Amino acid sequence: DDPPAGEDLLGLYEGVPMTERDTSYAMALPDRISIYRLPILRISEDADEAREQVGVTVVHEVAHHFGIGDDRLHDLGYA
């Protein structure tokens, strides 16, 4: 529901991006994406806006999985 204490996040990708994986990745824990409901609801004016923000946040976090950084996501409108 809420991000880690002290963090102002809507979502979080935890893992090793595809662009940084090597042969030692086989023993790594699975990647995980968390979407934080309460921060999204706080910045959304209604349910439609919340749904749209969830979609943007999911795309943003999946992009991190593929090695796309925040600067590029901002350029694409997903930051």
Image (tube, rainbow, N blue to C red):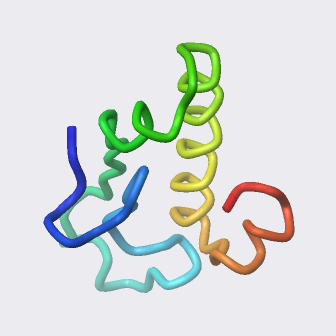
**Residue 74 in which image quadrant:** bottom right
Q: Is residue 28 above or below residue 24?
A: above
Which residue sits furthest left?
Answer: 5
**Residue 21 in which image quadrant:** bottom left
Residue at 41 percent of width and 31 percent of height: 41
Residue at 36 percent of width and 50 percent of height: 33
Which residue sits furthest top?
Answer: 47
Task: State which quarter of the image contains the N terminus.
Answer: top left
Tell whether 70 sits left or right of 34. right
Q: Nearest the camera: 18 or 68? A: 68
Which residue sits furthest front?
Answer: 45
Q: Is residue 33 above or below residue 68?
A: above
Q: Position of residue 46 (x, y in %)?
A: 56, 17
Residue at 32 percent of width and 58 percent of height: 31
Q: Is residue 26 above or below residue 35?
A: below
Which residue sits furthest right?
Answer: 75
Q: Position of residue 61 (x, y in %)?
A: 52, 55
Task: State which quarter of the image contains the C terminus.
Answer: bottom right
Q: Nearest the camera: 54 or 27? A: 54
Q: Nearest the camera: 61 or 77? A: 77
Residue at 36 percent of width and 44 percent of height: 39
Q: How many marks?
A: 0
Q: Position of residue 59 (x, y in %)?
A: 63, 46
Tell whether 39 sits left or right of 70. left
Q: Position of residue 6 (x, y in %)?
A: 20, 72
